[in-house]
Amino acid sequence: MLPLQAVTPTALTEAVCGVPLEEARRIVGAIHRHDHLPAAVRNVRRTTLDRVRAAGTLPTLTVREVRCSRIDPFVKYSLESRDGEIVETVRIPLERHGRYSVCVSSQAGCGLGCAFCATSRLGLLRNLETWEIVEQVRVVRRGLNRVQGQRVHGIVFQGMGEPLANLDNVIESIRVACEPSGLAVDGRAITVCTAGLPAGIRRLAREVPAIRLAISIASPIPAVRGRLMPIDRAFPLEEVLDAAVEHARVTGLAPMWSFTLLNGINDSSHDARELAALALDFTRRSGSRPRISIVPFNPIDPAGPQSFVRSSHDREEAFRQVLREAGVPSHKRYSGGADILGACGQLAGEHQNLRQPGFPE
């Protein structure tokens, strides 16, 4: 059966014989307005609705838990798939009142093994289907008060999993999200975050050029980055940034570089100077200055021993000052929802039998 929340009007006409494009647009719009396929849709023939109803279904994710942070307006959803996997989604408040971004998962678990991320300790369980990604946004949207003007303004693929390792389904979910009769989210408000898969970065530029790119840097020093992010051994940061240069040239969009500061590991003045050199070189080659986002480390197992420690405020400020002096601005990301294990790097933190974290020697 065709998951109806995961198709664009064009895809619906291709999947169900005899459905004209205009009627497909109205059907898709009705599904996303009402969260179900109504018995009647204005200006859609009953025979068309019958064909779609016979070919399609609207599967759901079961909401197992909704946790609201006590310290900020972040909300985390634990959702169960039909085969029992748990995925986590976070509602992020934006500066403009009533607008939210949804941090979605693209995989159950993750196979990349980044040492400072809770999700990586699960290992890869499976890729999420297109409808499972789209449904995360729909679940969050159901909890908003549309009468008061609350709405989903943006989507960030920074939840569980590596989006570029599930790129077919991620791209299809982006198309549904951007479709005016679908989720109607502006592509410029959608960001795909990656640990660094060059072929996927180039494909994003070709197929969804309005979407923004974010890259987890971790360290500008290859030996350190390889220990923090094992993917660097297969795809070194140099190759990742070459692909990002192409992405910036094709799309005209500057990437975000996400940098999680870890005390005594990647937060020295030397690290900052090396990061600044990378940023200046990237700007020279691409014509776009990367937006460097300094991310505080969030404990990934609050009840257990920690392999990493968050850099102090003074070390963080010294790091950013070195960047400023080199002509490379940065901003500090507010990483909310830490008390509900909903902040950056914490998703999947409440699962049992996690692999032990560590910084391999």
Image (cartoon, rainbow, N blue to C red):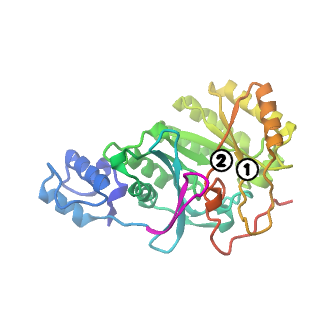
- The magenta stretch is 62-78
Task: Specify the amino acid type for callout 2.
Answer: Gly
- The circle on residue 196 is 2
The image quarter containing residue 213 is top right
Residue 263 pos. (x, y %): 83, 50
Q: Residue at x 83, y 60 (%)?
A: 360
Q: Nearer the viewer, residue 65 or 35?
A: 65
Contact between labelled residues 2 and 1, with CB atoms less than 8 Å apart: yes
Q: Look at mark 1 in the image and give the residue it sits on.
A: 232
- Whole-angstrom CA distance, mark 1 to mark 2, is 8 Å
Q: Residue furthest front?
A: 70
Q: Nearer the viewer, residue 341 or 45?
A: 341
Q: Residue at x 82, y 43 (%)?
A: 267
Binning the other alpha carbons within 10 Å of mark 1 as few (below 14), some (14 to 19) or many (20 upward) gives many
Q: Is residue 186 above or below residue 156?
A: above
Query: What main secondary structure does the magenta stretch of the protein show?
Result: strand
Mark yes or no: residue 277 visible.
Answer: no
Q: Nearer the viewer, residue 305 or 213?
A: 305
Residue 104 pos. (x, y %): 52, 54
Task: Specify the amino acid type for callout 1.
Answer: Asp
Q: Is residue 57 above or below residue 18?
A: below
